[in-house]
Amino acid sequence: MFIGDDWAEDHHDLEIEDQDGHRLARARLPEGLEGITRLHALVAEHAPAVWADLPPEQLAGQVIVGIETDRGPWVTALRAASYQVFAINPLSAAAALHLGGKERRR
């Protein structure tokens, strides 16, 4: 499961995709405990059935999050939940698309 997180000061715009790149969910979540709680619920709701018997920390380890920052309370909470978190520079991502990557419509 992949999560793209477009971070802003007071919210997070998320897209959750399966391993084949099919969109499972989109959401705008508030910064803070309410938002991270809703994120965990979305992950649980869209987790593949084969993950049902995994312990929570193992299930969370199957989730890959790309986000525009590598610090802050939200990133700390993602890492504490055992998600795999990768900071992605949005300018680098845009340049990669421009140089020949396949751009997808939102």
Image (cartoon, helix red, strand yellow):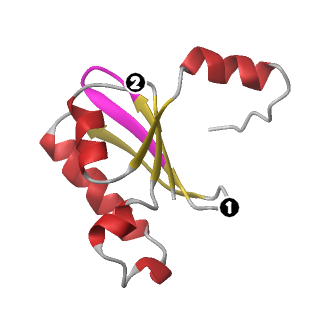
Residue 20's disc is: 1
In the image, farthest residue toward the left: 33
Please tell me whether the stretch drawn in magenta is mainly helix, strand or loop: strand
Find residue 14 and report its horizontal and vertical position in percent: 43, 42
- The alpha-carbon separation of the residues under discs 1 and 2 comes to 25 Å
Label 2 crowd (10 A; few <14 / some 14-19 / many >=20): some
Quarter of the image for residue 103 reads: top right
Question: Which amino acid is tagged 2?
Answer: Thr
Quarter of the image for residue 57 reads: bottom left
To which residue does mark 2 refer?
69
- Secondary element at tag 2: loop
First in sequence: mark 1 vs mark 2:
1
Residue at figure coordinates x 72%, y 17% from the top left:
95
- Secondary element at tag 1: loop
Residue at figure coordinates x 63%, y 59% from the top left:
22
Query: Can residue 74 be found in the magenta stretch?
Result: no
Give 68 or 22, whichever is nearer the viewer.
68
If the image is split into quadrants, where does the C terminus sit?
Answer: top right
Q: Is residue 19 left or right of residue 10?
A: right
Question: Which amino acid is tagged 1?
Answer: Asp
Find residue 66 and report its horizontal and vertical position in percent: 49, 38
Q: For the magenta stretch, what is the residue range? A: 7-15
